[in-house]
Image (spheres, helix red, strand yellow):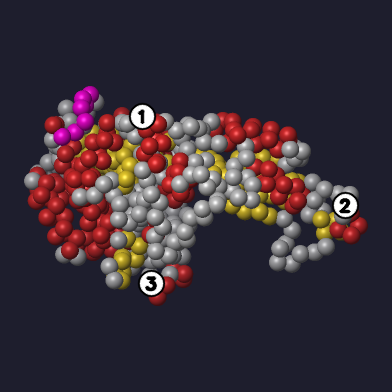
């Protein structure tokens, strides 16, 4: 029966129906950064997702502007058997700004276009194309089998691109209707376009500001140079004390913890390959003793995002009285985040820079499950069979996703199966989707869902009890 589902998935893609359905998703201008809870975001839930999921036998609930958070949520539940496992799928309806006037060759970000087998449109990679694959795989199996053989919950939010406001609080408040045996979701990129990837979590992002606010005015450098401290020089020195000119992180308390042998082995097996048009890794940056994969996915890295003092376009002969810098620590799970700010302040004081203040701007937590989790072994084996390739098992991606909401708040294993790749231009003009990844993604998701529906083909034991409900016939 799985073979028949694969045939249907291929026909769906090659017939143009997949493209047409994705084009409709892309046409909704769901920019959360501009219009929180906009008409378009609400319409995407009400006009697209709710009818689609209801037609597949899901019971749906929309929580619009939940708790005045600026974020809306859609929960869709199809509960077939209290003895079967429950799977939670996650996706987000919102996209980043369209950047309409910056797309090449007259492309419209809200009109899906096929150019030599590359499909351009905002949200094709992040995240509409990815949840379109997963919804399509579930629908194809239901059409072929009449049932899934397991319980499936979809959770969609409308604010991932603005930091997922209240997502954790919403999940915590609705844990009875969202708790599952495993999360299987799709977001972020594969390690490259050719390699099926299974990642288990994300690095965190700890963003902070260094400020030297020494005096209200900038004073003439001829009158005061040599006897007054320069705020710009001071902040530059503070940055240099934390991370040197070769990108090396100098503060011991900010370093990555030693990985488990299994995690270290998983990282050692990975190879980072840039996409066409991407820059090559700098072999001398950060730690030449580590592979690019170990640096990107297994290390704590401190990046300077912005520096500010005076007016670089129209400088005057004056000593800046104030200056600031924004830095971001990308860190792996297991790092002691509570110690970050105190450690930075102590380090600066020890280096004669106690006048520099440290303020946390924002913090996105890191989390991941262990590569030894039985769900990981199970999923990787099925993905290998479905794709005919060796799946890259990535302990965590280099960026950030709301994995902690599921791994920590719900306490369930988290499996991320991305249907995009690093060169997809997400968050930039010319975002695109590769139908070759879409076809492989459909095969993989059909296979994962198929095996979940058969008791002898999924991890055991399954202990969670889910109340069964009557369901309408699937279409």
The x and y percentages for residue 180 are 28, 32
Instruction: Give the total number of marks visible in the rendering.
Output: 3
Residue position for label 2? 226
Asked which secondary structure carries label 3, the reply is: loop
Asked which secondary structure carries label 1, the reply is: loop
Side of 209 where 82 appears, left or right:
left
Residue position for label 3? 107
| Figure check: 112 above or below 78 | below
Residue position for label 1? 411
Q: Residues within 10 Å of mark 2 (few under 14, many from 20)?
A: few
Residue 88 is at least partly visible in this image? yes
Residue most extreme to the right:
223
Residue most extreme to the front:
289
Sequence-first disc among 1 and 2: 2
For the point 20% across and 39% down, the residue is: 78
Sequence-first disc among 2 and 3: 3
| Figure check: 168 above or below 234 | above
How much space separates mark 1 and mark 2, taking CA atoms? Answer: 58 Å
Q: Are marks 1 and 2 in contact (CB under 8 Å)?
A: no
């Amino acid at each position: 029966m799985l073979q028949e589902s694969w045939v249907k998935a291929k026909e769906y893609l090659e017939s143009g129906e997949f493209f047409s359905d994705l084009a409709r998703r892309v046409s909704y201008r769901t920019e959360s950064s501009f219009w929180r809870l906009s008409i378009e975001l609400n319409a995407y839930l009400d006009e697209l997702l709710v009818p689609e999921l209801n037609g597949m036998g899901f019971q749906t609930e929309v929580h619009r502007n939940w708790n005045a958070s600026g974020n809306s949520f859609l929960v869709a539940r199809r509960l077939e058997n209290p003895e079967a496992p429950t799977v939670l799928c996650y996706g987000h309806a919102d996209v980043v700004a369209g950047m309409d006037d910056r797309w090449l060759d007259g492309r419209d970000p809200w009109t899906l276009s096929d150019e030599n087998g590359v499909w351009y449109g905002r949200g094709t990679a992040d995240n509409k194309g990815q949840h379109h694959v997963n919804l399509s795989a579930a629908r194809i199996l239901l059409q072929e089998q009449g049932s899934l053989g397991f319980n499936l919950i979809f959770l969609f939010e409308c604010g991932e691109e603005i930091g997922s406001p209240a997502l954790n609080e919403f999940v915590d408040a609705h844990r009875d209707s969202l708790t599952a045996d495993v999360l299987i979701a799709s977001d972020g990129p594969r390690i490259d376009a050719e390699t099926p990837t299974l990642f288990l979590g994300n690095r965190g992002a700890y963003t902070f500001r260094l400020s030297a606010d020494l005096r209200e005015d900038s004073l003439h450098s001829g009158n005061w140079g040599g006897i007054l401290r320069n705020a710009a020089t001071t902040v530059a020195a503070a940055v240099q004390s934390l991370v040197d000119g070769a990108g090396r992180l100098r503060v011991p308390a900010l370093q990555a913890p030693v990985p488990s042998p299994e995690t270290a082995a998983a990282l050692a097996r990975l190879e980072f390959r840039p996409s066409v048009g991407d820059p090559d890794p700098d072999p001398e940056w950060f730690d030449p003793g580590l592979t690019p994969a170990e640096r990107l996915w297994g290390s704590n890295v401190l990046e300077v995002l912005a520096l500010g003092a005076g007016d670089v376009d129209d400088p005057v002969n004056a000593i800046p009285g104030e200056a600031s810098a924004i830095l971001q620590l990308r860190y792996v799970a297991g790092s002691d985040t509570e110690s970050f700010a105190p450690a930075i302040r102590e380090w600066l004081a020890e280096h004669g820079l106690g006048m520099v203040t440290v303020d946390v701007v924002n913090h996105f937590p890191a989390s991941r499950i262990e590569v030894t989790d039985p769900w990981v072994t199970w999923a990787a084996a099925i993905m290998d069979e479905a794709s005919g390739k060796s799946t890259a098992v990535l302990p965590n991606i280099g960026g950030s996703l709301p994995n902690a909401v599921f791994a920590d708040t719900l306490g369930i294993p988290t499996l991320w199966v991305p249907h995009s790749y690093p060169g997809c231009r997400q968050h930039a003009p010319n975002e695109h989707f590769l139908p070759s990844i879409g076809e492989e993604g459909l095969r993989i998701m059909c296979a994962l869902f198929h095996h979940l529906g058969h008791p002898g083909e999924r991890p055991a034991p399954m202990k969670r009890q889910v109340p069964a409900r009557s369901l309408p016939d699937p279409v």
